[in-house]
Amino acid sequence: MGAEPSRQPEAAPYHHPAAGWGAARSVTEFLVRERTLLDGPRAILKMNHENGGFDCPGCAWPDDTKGLHLDICENGIKHVTWEMTRKRVGREFFAAHTVTELSGWSDFALEDQGRLTEPMVYDEATDRYVPIDWQHAFDLFGASVRALDDPNRAAFYTSGRLGNEATFLYQLMARELGTNNLPDCSNMCHEASGRALQAALGTGKGTADLKDWEAADALFILGVNAASNAPRMLTALADATRRGARIVHVNPLVEAAATRTIVPHEFLDMALFKATRTSNLNLQVRIGGDMALLRGIAKAVLEQSAQDPKALDQQFVERHTTGFAAYRDLCERTPWEELERQSGLSREQILHAARIYREADRSIFSWCLGVTQHEHGVDAIREIVNVLLLRGNIGREGAGPSPVRGHSNVQGNRTCGIDHRPAPGFLDRLSAVCGIDAPREHGKDTVATIEAMARGEVKVFVGMGGNFALAAPDTDYTYRALRRCELTVHVSTKLNRSHLVHGRRALILPCLGRTEQDHQRGGLQATSVEDSMSMVHLSVGMKKKPASRHLLSEPAVIAGLARAALPDSATPWEWYVEDYDRIRDTMAEVLDGFEDFNRRVRLPLGFRIKQPARELVFLTPSGRAEFSAAPLPDVLPAPGTLVLGTMRSHDQWNTTIYSDNDRYRGVKNLRTLIFMNPDDMRARHLAEFDPVDITATARDGSTRSLHGYLAVPHDLPRGCAAGYMPEMNVLCAIGDYSTQSDQPIMKHLNVTVVPATQGATRPE
Ligand SMILES: Nc1nc2c(c(=O)[nH]1)N[C@H]1C(S)=C(S)[C@@H](COP(=O)(O)OP(=O)(O)OC[C@H]3O[C@@H](n4cnc5c(=O)[nH]c(N)nc54)[C@H](O)[C@@H]3O)O[C@H]1N2
Ligand SMILES: Nc1nc2c(c(=O)[nH]1)N[C@H]1C(S)=C(S)[C@@H](COP(=O)(O)OP(=O)(O)OC[C@H]3O[C@@H](n4cnc5c(=O)[nH]c(N)nc54)[C@H](O)[C@@H]3O)O[C@H]1N2
Ligand SMILES: [Mo]
């Protein structure tokens, strides 16, 4: 897998501020490559704007509260231009290449063919995709679904960029068919956050919004590579520094956002190369060590409260929480040595973080995959809440938990019904309003769906966006599972691996992207999305001419699929698609917090879904915020092994690889690498770029290997290693998912690393 195969790998520390001119140059190169030098900049000026414009299809960071601001980032721009490319993949392309041949292409080469232009169906006789018209494609799906003896033999995956209206129709189709099999990318992402916050605070989401970020005195940023994956957070960090707030980064790696930045839209700073510091303290925890650090902070706060009663918000704890005594006991009983060992930090470092926390009136804790993709992800996030509760950092300005969500609408997907474990109250309302009998039995999440496909139980798989084959764990197993299906259907914008790893029959259904105008009988349509901080607003495409005239919008594709599978359905599928206001009117009746949806979503900045926990209303069994008292997990690597975390490079979007560079980590022309501590390399007699074999041992003792990866020294704690997803999904065993969140454990693989027996893997 690789974009620039013939170039020599390079690795050197990166000494420049995040964003700034490196980002500007990278954007220009990208616009040229995608041949969108004219359309790209025009689109970017329309992005994330108050009153119109489309929502950046990049990350889920909220738009600037001032609304008028051009808050853009390098990676958002890349993501938009990726969709707007002038390259096309049409029927001639598919006629010229068999699926077997395409299977030998790199993932980069597949997506690089450009936008899909018409529906295609797999033809077994010629091993090629051939054109099919929309109605026949829908009919093939309808017949396959109706032939199933149980609706639970179908599964409906969502990748988190689907707009709210399409999301609502999609889950309605699944539930009208009779299944809650709605796996989604969130099952690999923030499932742990949802479960932890639900248990502790009675809400599955963060409670802090961007205004709170602007008012916080201390920001704790855990397990996120913000400069690459949530670059607009850099603006918030730079603003925080300027007003004197303090910022603590917790990450085994010192990522670019943890040093300094030049904010992308501050042109004067760009011109003067003026960087702003974005960190007061970097804590390089060991992988999985966050919980021990957090407990250490709590222990320090509690110890301090003996002399300084203000260290603890006694009144808040008494009035609004439960479980405090047990938690205090646990903290007192946990020895400092244990906290140091498990966190990989010294007592002084932990006390330093605790002092910053104690001295701040208002604190926000923010986190992403570095905290969630672990066996103990739920416990670790509950520990974040514990720490916040000690000082009453919930339900007031400038404070609270603030997970950084992934895909641009992954939070909206969950709000609008993509949930394999839906709440009974939601199902009641959905059934009553939509006149269906929604199934009550829980459905399958991502891992359970793969296992069921492998057993031959799930036979029809639909992917609404995304790249399931590559994104999921245990690549070989997942491939075998998908190939056992009777029918695989992918609604996509670009060709990807999931189209080639298909069932006996297979459909590729191309759809409009978010940048494109969506015209239906009722006129130009807008869709709504929800960001990481629960703001719901409209997104309207700006590109008049779609990538192809055969494309349908996602709601139209879903309506077509639904009608074919449910010919007698009383749901007015076609009527809904004529005017998305009609979908929104139904959503307003079904979904909590969506009253008066059509009016409120048209307010200049949209609206914020009410957050009970923000108002100190805790919808937990006790009616209070609940402390947890989980035992500290043992996260130390076994002797001779390393703990490996998989992550993204700067130049990729999940399974979409833009190039083989990772600018902020100083890497060029290389993805088949493993970052290691220099001492761990020396112990294995490895020099920079020496080829190694990596073997992961799963819980069940089975092993999975990658061969010929290159060792790259990096500043990370001993015993820890890192490398890139999705390539390293080969190493993630399907059975190794968290017993707390069911999330695949993608940040904590137990591996051995030895010099390669066969030399280096050269990218093809
Ligand atoms: N440009 C771009 N933007 C994206 C994406 C993309 O692929 N490209 N993906 C989107 C999606 S879907 C998501 S979910 C988010 C993902 O955003 P991130 O969570 O930033 O994703 P990762 O690249 O997996 O990086 C995880 C970070 O956690 C750190 N880490 C690893 N293990 C630990 C640990 O045990 N403790 C702590 N504290 N840190 C640890 C790693 O060093 C790394 O900095 O980004 C979204 N935004
Ligand atoms: N080892 C490891 N694996 C991981 C992770 C990790 O950290 N480590 N992270 C996990 C996480 S957090 C996530 S979210 C998943 C990501 O999993 P997915 O969301 O499944 O993957 P993406 O790469 O984001 O999907 C890209 C594809 O989406 C399609 N697409 C793009 N735009 C649109 C659109 O507007 N509409 C439609 N219908 N399709 C579109 C294109 O065809 C493109 O090829 O990966 C997970 N996998
Ligand atoms: Mo994600």
Image (cartoon, rainbow, N blue to C red):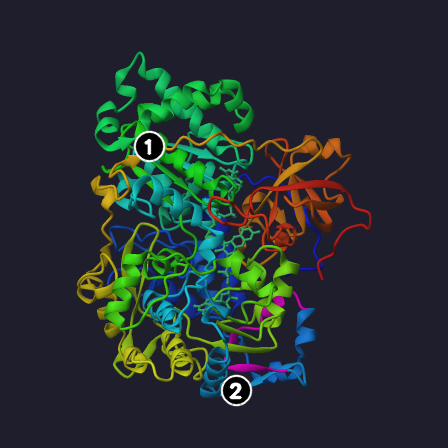
Q: Earlier in the sequence, mark 1 or mark 2?
A: 2
Residue 706, position as x, y percentages in the image: 71, 51
Instruction: Name above or below for residue 148 compared with residue 29.
Output: below
* Mark 1: amino acid: Leu
**Disc 1 target residue:** 388
Instruction: Name above or below for residue 391 compared with residue 215.
Output: above
Residues at marks 1 and 2, CA–CA distance in whole angstroms = 56 Å
- Element assignment for label 1: helix
For the point 31% across and 49% down, the residue is: 533
Q: Mark yes or no: residue 457 visible.
A: yes
Q: Quadrant of the C terminus?
A: bottom right
- Element assignment for label 2: loop
Q: Quadrant of the N terminus?
A: bottom right
Magenta segment: 105-123
For the point 56% across and 24% down, the residue is: 341
Q: Nearer the viewer, residue 221 or 585?
A: 585
Instruction: Name above or below for residue 763 compared with residue 11.
Output: below
Q: Is residue 549 magenta?
A: no
Residue 70, position as x, y percentages in the image: 32, 55
Neighbours of disc 1 within 10 Å: few (<14), some (14-19), many (20+): many
